[in-house]
Image (cartoon, coloured by chain):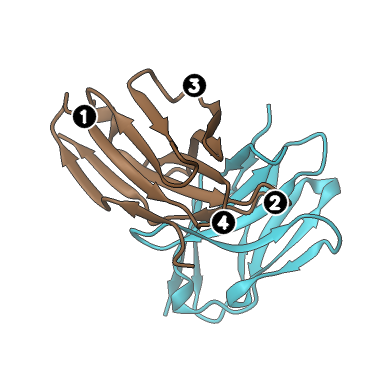
């Protein structure tokens, strides 16, 4: 068990470009979550998957954002036409469906939009 | 509205002193409660959790927290602060097993 991994760890892009982040959860975990964290704030929920099904999306997830988990394993989060306001740390977490929702977090991807 | 409030965005203590980080939540039913720690440029690491049973919960690194239903609180304590405890701490509440809400965080500074 190597924990939750995220790639890349850092991404710098110009406004208007598209970016894609990847998350690899703990292998036996069937739930996967995406959060956004800005400076001085706690993580804000974006969306979550149970296996390959995307079950909930926050209103924070505008139509420029899309997430997939095609085979119920890794997940990708894409942001199209990035804006400076998208600059943040994007965190991924995974958990087991049963029992309390103890989520295990990856190290995050820090996005800077110039 | 369901919410999590961490009183004090920044707490500073001397090395060896008691650490107390406050968390209050709003809920009509007892939720699951968590404390996470985040070191710079890293993800969140679970310190401890309350689900059911004993209201005093012990976690890693000498931390503990007490669930007080009457006060809707879940304050985090550590008897003696070490320099290594300097980090950002987040209280989180899981209301229905898929809706985790985080507080804004408390940055702990430990002075030598």
Measure the C-alpha gap from mark 3 to mark 2.
24 Å
Q: Is residue B41 left or right of residue B44?
A: left
User: Residue B29 got which mark?
Assistant: none
User: Residue A18 got which mark?
Assistant: 1
- Work out whether mark 4 precedes mark 1 in sequence or the reverse, and give the earlier one: 1
Q: Is residue A65 left or right of residue A84?
A: right
Measure the C-alpha gap from mark 1 to mark 3.
20 Å
Measure the C-alpha gap from mark 1 to mark 2.
36 Å
Q: Is residue B101 left or right of residue A90?
A: right
Badge 4 is on which residue?
Answer: A28
**Residue A32 at x, y = what percent?**
52, 44
| Chain of the residue on which disc 1 is drawn | A
Badge 3 is on which residue?
Answer: A59
Badge 3 and badge 2 both on one subunit: no
Q: Residues within 10 Å of mark 2 (few under 14, many from 20)?
A: many
User: Residue B33 got which mark?
Assistant: 2
- Residue farthest along the top direction in this orientation: A63
**Residue B17 at x, y = what percent?**
57, 77
**Residue B64 at x, y = what percent?**
69, 69
Q: Is residue A96 above or below residue B64?
A: above
């Amino acid at each position: 068990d190597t924990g939750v991994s995220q790639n890349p760890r850092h991404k710098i892009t110009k406004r208007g470009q598209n970016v894609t982040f990847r998350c690899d959860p703990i292998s036996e975990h069937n739930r996967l979550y995406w959060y956004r964290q800005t400076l001085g704030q706690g993580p804000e929920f974006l969306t979550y998957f149970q296996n390959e099904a995307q079950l909930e999306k926050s209103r924070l997830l505008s139509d420029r954002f899309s997430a997939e988990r095609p085979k119920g394993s890794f997940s990708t989060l894409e942001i199209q036409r990035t804006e400076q306001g998208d600059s943040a740390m994007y965190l991924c977490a995974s958990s087991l469906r049963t029992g309390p929702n103890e989520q295990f977090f990856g190290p995050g991807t820090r996005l800077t939009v110039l | 509205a369901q919410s999590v409030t961490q009183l004090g965005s920044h707490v500073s203590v001397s090395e060896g002193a008691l650490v107390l980080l406050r968390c209050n939540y709003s809920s009509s039913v007892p939720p699951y409660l968590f404390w996470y720690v985040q070191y710079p440029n890293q993800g969140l690491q679970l310190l401890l959790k309350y689900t059911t049973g004993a209201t005093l919960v012990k976690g890693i690194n000498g931390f503990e927290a007490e669930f007080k239903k009457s006060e809707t609180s879940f304050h985090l304590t550590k008897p003696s602060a070490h320099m290594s405890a300097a980090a950002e701490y987040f209280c989180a509440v899981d209301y229905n097993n898929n809706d985790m809400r985080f507080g804004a965080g408390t940055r702990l500074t430990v002075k030598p």
